Amino acid sequence: MITMKWWNDIWLNESFANLIGYIACERVQIAENELPNNFNQEPGHTILSEDIWNYFSSEKAASIIDDCLPSTHSIDAPCNDTEQAQGLLDGITYGKGAVFLSQIIKTIGYQTFFEGCKQYF
């Protein structure tokens, strides 16, 4: 989703995709709640919006634990080669990066953030 010049920016690509997954699930759930009662929905596929953000909170907690380990690294870690990039695809990159982006959204606002995304894409 994000075009990178080099692997150093892999955190942004992966964190953005991770967070957008949660946001998309929430939006789909909200849309499903607005469907007419006679709409044919498959049973067993309903996830409440609160549950989606509980999953996000669980991932956030796991990334905090990972961040306390000796193997921790910043989300924007330097990367010299593809092998090193593979080592950066972990809970810190996905979880902590997504939390960082969610904080940006809370700070500048949902609409401003997504207007910026539209302009970028």
Image (cartoon, helix red, strand yellow):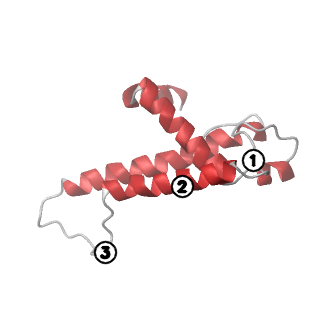
Q: Position of residue 65 (x, y in %)?
A: 64, 53
Q: Amino acid at mark 2?
A: Glu
Drawn side of residue 31 relative to residue 109, left or right: left
Residue at image coords 62%, 47%: 14
> Relative to 3, is 116 above or below?
above
Q: Name the mark on residue 59.
A: 2
Q: Quadrant of residue 25?
A: bottom left
Q: Secondary structure at mark 1?
A: loop
> Which amino acid, by three-letter code, is at mark 3?
Gly
Q: Which residue is identified by label 1?
A: 72
* Mark 1 vs 3, N-terminal side: 3
The residue carrying pointer 2 sits among few (fewer than 14), some (14 to 19) or many (20 or more) residues within 10 Å by Cα, namely some
Amino acid type assigned to the residue bearing label 1 in the image: Thr
Contact? badges 2 and 3 (CB < 8 Å)? no
What is the C-alpha distance between the residues marked 2 and 3? 23 Å
Residue located at (72% from left, 39% from top): 74
Residue under the image location 45 percent in, 58 percent down = 55
Label 1 CA crowd tier, 10 Å (few <14, some 14–19, many 20+): some
Q: Residue 100's x, y, as percent?
A: 56, 37
Residue under pointer 3: 44
Q: Are marks 1 and 3 in contact (CB under 8 Å)?
A: no
Indicate left or right for 120 with 38 as reference: right
Question: Residue 10's quadrant in the figure?
Answer: top right
Q: Quadrant of residue 115?
A: top left
Near-viewer residue (118 or 49): 49
Mark 1 vs mark 3, foreground winner is: 1
Mark with earlier residue (2, 3): 3
